[in-house]
Amino acid sequence: MTADEHEALPFVRRYLQEHGQEVDVHADAELRLLSASDGAALFAVGKTLEGFGSITFERDGSEWKFDRSQGRCLPQGWVGGREASPWAVEGALDRASRRVYALVEEMACAGGMPADGRINPPLIEWGSTTVIVTITVRPKDGVQNCLGYPPTKFSFDLPEPLGDRVLLDGFHEPPAPPGTPMTSG
């Protein structure tokens, strides 16, 4: 289903006409449906490949009501239904070795604790000139506070030594070198 087909769209458009300035969204902004259920709809607002905001509406009887909005987001990678986590190379990268030492930054709230034991095996996309590594973290069970995000040491093996290939982090869309700040796209 596209944004144009979702039953919440007229309510979203009317809300943006009346309140768009309050949530810093232009009334004629491009809308893309990101997620929908019987009771909620999440829309990307703006050009999704250039950074975007989001707006969520919830069903209230036969109408849809504004729930919340979020400022500028950047597209990012997902693997197996899990949000990717940004990572950086720890120390010097040994291009003659298969082993890569990384520092992984968990994106979910985890009570200020590192992601030890919760980092999934990385998705490694091996190309002739690039290697894209996308890392995900299993979230902690239960409600967690969002006290800091300490990086977690993690190592993984490539299928063969990196050599002259460019190593990229699949968290970013498009992929970027490991350690690229999250605000870059």
Image (cartoon, helix red, strand yellow):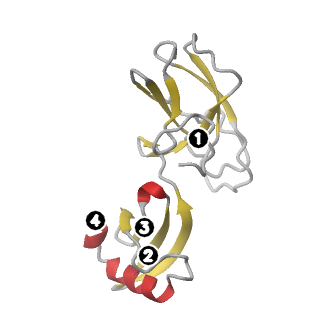
- Amino acid type at circle 1 is Pro
Q: Which residue is mark 2?
A: 57
Which numbered disc, 1 or 2, marks the residue that appears first in the sequence? 2
Task: Estimate the spatial distance between the alpha carbons at disc 1 and disc 2, rounded to whole Å.
Answer: 29 Å
Horizontal arrangement in the rendering, residue 45 relative to residue 181 (left or right):
left
Which numbered disc, 3 or 1, marks the residue that appears first in the sequence? 3
Q: 60 or 35: which is nearer to us?
A: 35
Task: Estimate the spatial distance between the alpha carbons at disc 3 and disc 2, rounded to whole Å.
Answer: 7 Å
Mark 2: secondary structure: strand
Crowd band around label 2 with a 10 angstrom C-alpha radius: few (<14), some (14–19), many (20+): many
Which numbered disc, 3 or 2, marks the residue that appears first in the sequence? 3
Task: Estimate the spatial distance between the alpha carbons at disc 3 and disc 4, rounded to whole Å.
Answer: 12 Å
Q: Which residue is mark 3?
A: 42
Task: Estimate the spatial distance between the alpha carbons at disc 1 and disc 4, rounded to whole Å.
Answer: 29 Å
Residue 99: x and y in percent read: 58, 16
Q: Which residue is mark 1?
A: 86
